[in-house]
Amino acid sequence: MEPVYRTIIGLARTVFFAEGLKFTVVGDEHIPASGGAVLAVNHTGYMDFTYAGLPVRTPKRYIRFMAKKEVFDNSVSGPIMRALKHIPVDRGAGADSYKAAVDYLRRGELVGVYPEATISRSFEIKEFKSGAARMAIEADVPIIPIVIWGAQRVWTKGFPKRLGRTNTPISIAVGAPIPPDEPAAELTARLRVTMQGLLADLQKDYTHEPGAYWVPARLGGSAPTLEEADAMDAAEAAERAAAKAAREDRE
């Protein structure tokens, strides 16, 4: 029993109802009833992690998400994140969070990760980091791909949040478990291809508004292409690095 997690789930469901969100979930039978697994989730919006929790409630399980340390440092969100047993990630010292995740997996927990590491501005599947594959291999647990479509319409990078009653449809697909039976590079590539396929399947039955910011360029929207989005991310990262260097020089 996890009373805090159950309470948070209840509050989240109340919010979803108030927003009029319309969920379609397929493949939730792939979530194991017990045992560890890495849940690899695509990243298009700030609320992805709340929606990713829906399929795991079919077998009454919980996700321990890996999240940036700054969320845990916040006086409001920090106590909640710790109570839910999520895993803080310090990008300057990632070894500790990696070890904690592997320990969770070996104890039979579901650990949620974003292989893309950051929100995809193109809403396509970005290149993956290898962490999910390496954790699965070390803990000897499967990777379960989860793809969410429509979350970017609620709140995504660079656009105002839409947390009122929007009646937004959100589709979620859970893929079959991928065993950790190949090297990390190959396993990462296999995971990405699998999630690209799941995303394409979800998009087939989803109504897309021509020219909308939340629709990929490939589907007639105004979102940047994957290449354009990668260039934007690189420019932003360079700006952050320059600002950090300037602060260190002043100190």
Image: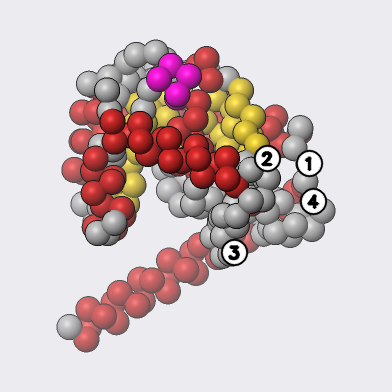
Write the residue at 65% across / 37% down.
Answer: 22
Q: Is residue 32 magenta?
A: no
- Magenta segment, which residues? 56-60
Q: Could you classify mark 2 by the number of other residues whose Cα lies within 10 Å: few (under 14), some (14-19), or many (20 or more)?
A: some
Decide which of tag 2 and tag 1 comes sooner along the chain: 2
Residue under pointer 2? 169
Residue type at numbered disc 4: Glu
Residue beneath disc 3: 159
Q: Residue at x 58, y 64 (%)?
A: 160
Q: Position of residue 232 (x, y in %)?
A: 55, 65
Determine which residue is flagged by label 1. 207
In the image, 221 versus 209, the foreground residue is 209
Q: Earlier in the sequence, mark 2 or mark 4?
A: 2
Disc 2 to disc 1: CB gap under 8 Å: yes
Q: Amino acid at mark 2?
A: Pro
Disc 3 element: loop
- The numbered mark at residue 209 is 4
